[in-house]
Amino acid sequence: MNIQNALAALKEKFGYSSFRPGQEEVIQHLLNGENALAVMPTGGGKSLCYQIPALLMPGITVVVSPLIALMKDQVDALNQEGIAATYINSSLSCPEIDHRFAMAARGDVKLLYIAPERLDSDHFFNELAGLNVSMVAVDEAHCISQWGHDFRPSYLTLTETIAQLPSHPVVIALTATATRKVAADIRERLNIPTANEVNTGFARDNLSFRVIKDQNKDTYLLEYLKLNNDQSGIIYASTRKEVERLYHLLDAHDISVTYYHAGLSETERATNQEDWLFDRKQVMVATNAFGMGIDKSNVRFVIHAQVPGDLESYYQEAGRAGRDGLPSEAILLFKASDLQIRRFFIDQSDMDEEFKQNEYRKLHEMQQYANTQDCLQQFILRYFGQTGTEPCGRCGNCLDDRAFQDVTVDAQKVLSCVKRMRERFGKSLVAQVLTGAKTARVRELHLNDLPTYGLMSSQTQSHINEFIDFLVASGYLNQGGGQYPTLSVSEQGVAVLLGHAKVQRKMAVKATKTLPVAD
Ligand code: ADP
Ligand code: ZN
């Protein structure tokens, strides 16, 4: 089929004059009858990639989406454009579902939205198999991969379902969040040729990332919200309890705020969500239960009060800011101790060992993100496998104009201490040895006999901890997995120990006493 038809449909049905990056390529693959994967950032225009070919294909397009809350809106919007679409999910009665299937069988709809859970039922499959399905669109396709951050078992049934449909539909998978590994997994499971992955990158040019480290979070939040009191935003916290604590704190300071977590009643959740959606309340404090399928365009900031478990979730949650394309902020309030809590939860969970190691690895990436000196946007893009990009010029690190200081000597002290401790211990014990702490554990292990014991006694343990985080993030130290990760010296670190390389760090210039003004 000709791409000109697609362009005509873009103009006639949607009123747009040209395609966005990647759209044309994806649509061309589909019209050629080839499966394709579209990886595009939030707001990149993924929906049109299947909506337009759906109009041009003879049969029906089945859209699989986990966003049940959003289905009705999506379908209403299509109907308003004069496009015949409907949805089937658990919110509907049985007779209503039958009615909609009958409509689809008559050819009265072009797009049928369904929740993946539906596919688990034989009855449902038989109904579907009776339709002339030309295409299956798999939205939020990263949910199909166990390596992704949002794996959903019901997505696994998809592969089989599609293969068994007698009409042999073409398949389009779409996502805004996929590492190379996850993208490969999606392609394999859905039979998509490598060459048909259309990846426009993940960069969000209007988002500024920032990491705020080791500050009093409450104070920071209050100051930030007072300065931005006329803006809408989300604050993510890691537990229900913390959500409620922050809500009460902000509320007590007259900030226009509401909250959301899975422990609230359905009515409370709906009321609070709408207060925020319709700008009756500016700030939403929530757990990560909030946000999937929320389509609010004027969100100016997303602040994480605790570190999320992986960079994919972080980027997806942060990406809820600035869907309207206007400048917006994504801020992570970071404390190293938050990581320890997360490690504890992983350790206590009943996941198998391989899965635990994967979770630890993801957490480690998050820690690297919080401690890197590089451009934060670039760091994220690299994580998703997108290399060769320029520094963004907007993030906290790009704007950090503190001068580099040579910290080679301190780095050598830490690295040699790690070596002397035979690379068998973690950060806090290394810091104890370097500061010459007189703890029982140090004595038990005879670490006070090491030549590096007390070598940095003029510094505090928390300073050294932070310095070690920096050395890990910069690749001089390796940090193992597990709940108590051990430190070892990397190849790059060995070069520093041997005096072959220098270590530079951006540091706050210490306040000095002002000089007396001469008159
Ligand atoms: P995504 O699903 O990738 O987050 P959407 O499909 O919701 O993004 O599209 C985001 C917005 O961009 C929508 O308002 C959509 O109508 C608009 N859009 C998509 N494609 C085009 C285009 N070719 N020209 C202009 N606007 C477009
Ligand atoms: Zn940057």
Image (tube, grey):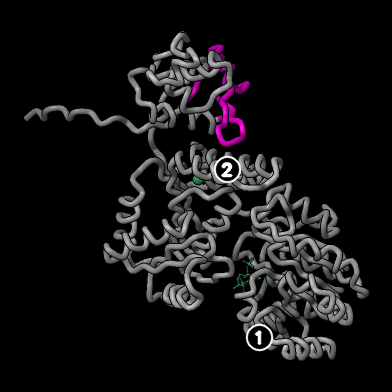
Q: Residue furthest right?
A: 166
Instruction: Rate crowding at label 1 as few (under 14), some (14 to 19) or many (20 or more) other CA atoms within 10 Å.
Output: few
Residue 328 shows in the view: no
Instruction: Rate crowding at label 2 as few (under 14), some (14 to 19) or many (20 or more) other CA atoms within 10 Å.
Output: many
For the C terminus, give its image quadrant: top left
Q: Amino acid at mark 2?
A: Leu
- Closer-to-camera residue (237/448): 448
- Closer-to-camera residue (426/227): 426
Q: Is residue 265 left or right of residue 180?
A: left
Q: Position of residue 377 (x, y in %)?
A: 54, 47
Q: How many marks?
A: 2
Residue 479 drawn in magenta:
yes
| Label pair 2/1, CB-CB below 8 angstroms | no
Quarter of the render that holds ligand 1: bottom right
Q: Is residue 519 left or right of residue 12?
A: left
Q: Residue at x 81, y 64 (%)?
A: 157
Whether 515 is drawn above or below 135: the answer is: above
Q: Residue at x 80, y 71 (%)?
A: 136
Whether 303 is drawn above or below 400: the answer is: below
SS class, disc 2: helix
Q: Which residues are magenta?
A: 475-504
Q: Amino acid at mark 1?
A: Glu
Badge number at residue 81: 1
Task: Locate residue 192: give its quadrant.
Answer: bottom right
- Mark 2 sits on what residue? 363
Residue 250 drawn in magenta:
no
